[in-house]
């Protein structure tokens, strides 16, 4: 199992590969010109921000706590985990 701290130290390319092969795709949302995919990976959630106009990844962000998950809570049910619980 890859711990949160280890995941954060990986390159963007490695993070994306691990999410695609081992993560569980949950949902997506659109914000401005970005498509944001949400994954559940082991015991935390990760967003992948795709810059549609450039066809690239702009950001991979680990979510910790309810405020970061709020955009998803209206459309899907998620178990909210705080980083301090990991």
Image (tube, grey):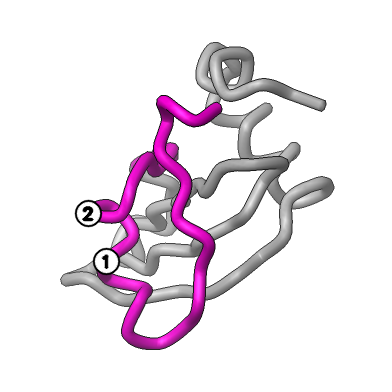
Q: How far apart are marks 1 and 2 (CA)?
A: 5 Å
Q: Mark 2 points at which residue?
A: 67
Q: Which mark is residue 47?
A: none
Q: Residue 82 in the image: x percent, y percent?
A: 40, 39
Q: What element carries label 1?
A: helix
The residue at the point 62 percent across, 14 percent down is 6
Are the residues flagged by discs 1 and 2 in contact, CB closer than 8 Å?
yes
Crowd tier of the residue under label 2, counting other residues whose Cα lies within 10 Å: few below 14, some 14–19, many 20 or above? few
Q: Is residue 30 left or right of residue 85?
A: left
User: Residue 64 appears in which quarter of the rendering?
Assistant: top left
Foreground residue, 70 or 52? 70
Does 83 lie within the magenta span? yes
Q: Residue at x 72, y 60 (%)?
A: 24
Q: Nearer the viewer, residue 15 or 24?
A: 24
Q: In the drawing, does residue 1 fall left or right of residue 82?
A: right
Q: Which region of the structure is painted magenta?
A: 59-86
Vertical placement of 40 versus 81: above or below?
Answer: below
Q: Considering the numbered disc 2 on the image, is that residue within a helix, a strand or a loop?
A: helix
* Image x and y of residue 48, in percent: 46, 51
* Label 1 environment density (alpha carbons within 10 Å; few <14, some 14–19, many ≥20): few
Q: Quarter of the image containing the N terminus?
A: top right
Horizontal arrangement in the rendering, residue 70 relative to residue 19 (left or right) = left
The x and y percentages for residue 54 are 33, 56
Give the vertical position of 63 relative to 30 (above or below): above
Where's the C terminus, which quadrant? top right
The residue sitting at the bottom extreme is 75
Which label was assigned to residue 70? 1
């Amino acid at each position: 199992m890859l711990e949160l701290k280890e995941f954060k130290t990986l390159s963007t390319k490695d993070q994306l590969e691990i999410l695609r092969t081992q993560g569980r795709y949950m949902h997506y949302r659109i914000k401005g010109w970005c498509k944001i995919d949400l994954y559940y990976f082991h015991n935390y959630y990760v967003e992948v921000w795709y810059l549609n106009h450039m066809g690239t990844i702009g950001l991979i962000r680990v979510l910790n706590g309810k405020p970061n998950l709020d955009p998803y809570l209206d459309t899907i049910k998620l178990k909210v985990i705080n980083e301090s619980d990991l």
